[in-house]
């Protein structure tokens, strides 16, 4: 509490200088070079890596928690994931999996407070906690960027990279690779992720979810987003903004650099992938109320199986042509290339080297509208950069990929 109060005082000074902050900036400060900002961002905002290690020691005493070290950061700090569930139940194979991660941006400690409150509630002895542990598997990474926290960065890791928007890089940061490997592992299980919550905080001093438009995703997904947000808001009346407050991905194709991008690109409506932004200002409070609303909202949304299934089943014909970034990238030796066709077309998907020479023809046929994919195996080729080009009727698009032996 002492550290939080000190940090709140520093933040108050910084907020005065952040009055011109654009409301379109989802989180962080507009000018991170000022003295006021550096003061506000100092001291790990009251919750550092050593505090996390202490809390892990407390949480692991619960019979409902397993703590795994899942990888290491640039500076070799261990990254941890908590798995929370009631293992006495005999329905483990049908439980839906909920993923939550926080503290991507070190200066957004309020995301930590909300996430830690969710952990505390999940380990409680009350009826809600028991029900949630029996119905779901919660996988929680409470600190995604410990290097940045310890180095007192604002939005970066030890290499000075914002790992929130590093997912489409040819050589992603170590932390991104760790998080992506967790997503891949869980999606290969019989009970894959059905929700991915990316917890942040914003100096706009509002609580809200980042809503993705139908143009950037799909009409069914946008309805599912609204359904989930409304369930959360119902459990914290007048505290969380409606879905229209912060609208993103206004057009196709959607961006590829975020964790939500990975979820959408690979699994579409099957994962409710969203960013939540809590208060990041001196009036930040009621983290327990926020955490409770989110947990109750998750439960209500997940139990609304009939409505959710009907929304997905109603998915309409694609409204745009799109060539997605291959995955994985970099790859060895195979990668998957996905694309979407607006209408039935004659499709050619070819691979070229850096000199423009044709290396492989992956597709050369008439295909129906909708989503398609092709596998490219580069086992017989040398390491390097290659290009793949999709042509469908009058539409064409080219993307770059990297093969590393």
Image (cartoon, grey):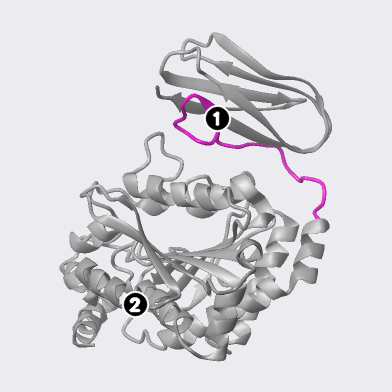
Q: Position of residue 130 (x, y in %)?
A: 55, 83
Q: Position of residue 143 (x, y in %)?
A: 33, 64
Residue 255 seen in the current view: yes
Residue 242 seen in the current view: no
Of residues 85 and 225, the one drawn nearer to the viewer in this rendering? 85
374 within the magenta span: no
Q: Main secondary structure of the magenta part?
A: loop
Q: Position of residue 104 (x, y in %)?
A: 36, 60
Asked if residue 259 is positioned above or below residue 115 in the image, the reply reads: above
328 within the magenta span: yes
Cα separation, mark 1 vs mark 2, equals: 41 Å
Image depth: mark 1 or mark 2 in front: 2
Asked if residue 153 is positioned above or below residue 368 in the image, the reply reads: below
Of residues 262 and 122, the one drawn nearer to the viewer in this rendering? 122
Tell me which corner region of the image, top left, top right, bottom left or bottom right, holds residue 349: top right
Tell me which corner region of the image, top left, top right, bottom left or bottom right, holds residue 299: bottom right
Image point 29% across, 64% down: which residue?
106
Tell me which corner region of the image, top left, top right, bottom left or bottom right, holds residue 278: bottom left
- As drawn, is 43 to the left or to the right of 111? left
- As drawn, is 172 to the left or to the right of 189? left
Instruction: Name the residue beneath numbered marker 1.
Output: 335
Image point 68% across, 56% down: which residue?
269
Q: Position of residue 223 (x, y in %)?
A: 72, 66
Image point 19% across, 87% down: which residue?
2
Instruction: Name the residue beneath numbered marker 2.
Output: 61
Sequence order check: which comes first, mark 1 or mark 2?
2
Badge 1 local density, few (<14 within 10 Å), some, or many (20+)? many
SS type, badge 2: loop
Q: Which residues are magenta?
A: 315-335
Q: Locate the C terminus by quadrant.
A: top left
Asked if residue 246 is positioned above or below residue 205 in the image, the reply reads: above
């Amino acid at each position: 509490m002492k550290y939080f109060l000190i940090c709140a005082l520093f933040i108050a000074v910084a907020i005065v200088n952040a009055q011109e902050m654009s409301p379109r900036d989802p989180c962080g400060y507009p000018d991170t070079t000022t003295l006021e900002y550096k003061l506000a961002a100092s001291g790990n905002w009251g919750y550092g890596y050593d505090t996390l290690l202490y809390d892990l020691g407390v949480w692991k005493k619960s019979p409902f928690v397993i703590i795994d070290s899942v990888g290491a950061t640039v500076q070799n700090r261990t990254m941890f994931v908590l798995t929370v569930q009631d293992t006495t139940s005999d329905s483990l194979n049908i439980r839906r999996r909920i993923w939550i991660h926080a503290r991507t941006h070190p200066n957004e400690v309020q995301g930590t407070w909300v996430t830690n409150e969710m952990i505390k509630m999940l380990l409680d002895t009350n009826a809600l906690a028991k029900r949630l542990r029996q119905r779901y598997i919660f996988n929680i990474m409470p600190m995604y960027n410990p290097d940045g926290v310890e180095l007192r960065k604002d939005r970066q890791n030890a290499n000075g990279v914002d790992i929130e928007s590093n997912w489409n890089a040819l050589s992603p940061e170590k932390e991104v690779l760790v998080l992506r490997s967790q997503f891949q592992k869980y999606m290969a299980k019989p009970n894959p992720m059905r929700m991915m919550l990316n917890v942040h905080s914003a100096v706009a001093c509002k609580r809200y979810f980042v809503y993705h438009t139908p143009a950037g995703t799909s009409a069914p997904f946008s309805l599912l987003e609204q359904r989930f947000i409304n369930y959360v808001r119902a459990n914290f009346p007048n505290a969380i903004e409606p879905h229209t407050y912060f609208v993103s991905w206004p057009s196709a194709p959607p961006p590829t650099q975020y964790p939500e991008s990975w979820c959408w690109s690979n699994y579409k409506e099957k994962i409710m992938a969203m960013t939540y932004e809590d208060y990041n200002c001196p009036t930040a409070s009621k983290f327990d109320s926020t955490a409770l609303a989110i947990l109750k909202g998750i439960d209500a949304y997940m139990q609304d199986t009939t409505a959710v299934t009907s929304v997905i089943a109603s998915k309409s014909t694609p409204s745009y042509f799109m060539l997605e970034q291959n995955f994985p990238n970099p790859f060895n030796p195979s990668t998957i290339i996905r694309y979407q066709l607006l209408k039935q077309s004659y499709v050619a998907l070819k691979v070229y080297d850096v000199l423009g020479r044709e290396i492989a023809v992956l597709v050369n046929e008439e295909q129906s509208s909708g989503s398609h994919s092709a596998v490219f195996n580069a086992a017989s080729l040398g390491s390097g950069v290659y290009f793949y080009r999709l042509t469908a009727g009058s539409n064409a698009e080219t993307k770059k990929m990297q093969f590393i032996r």
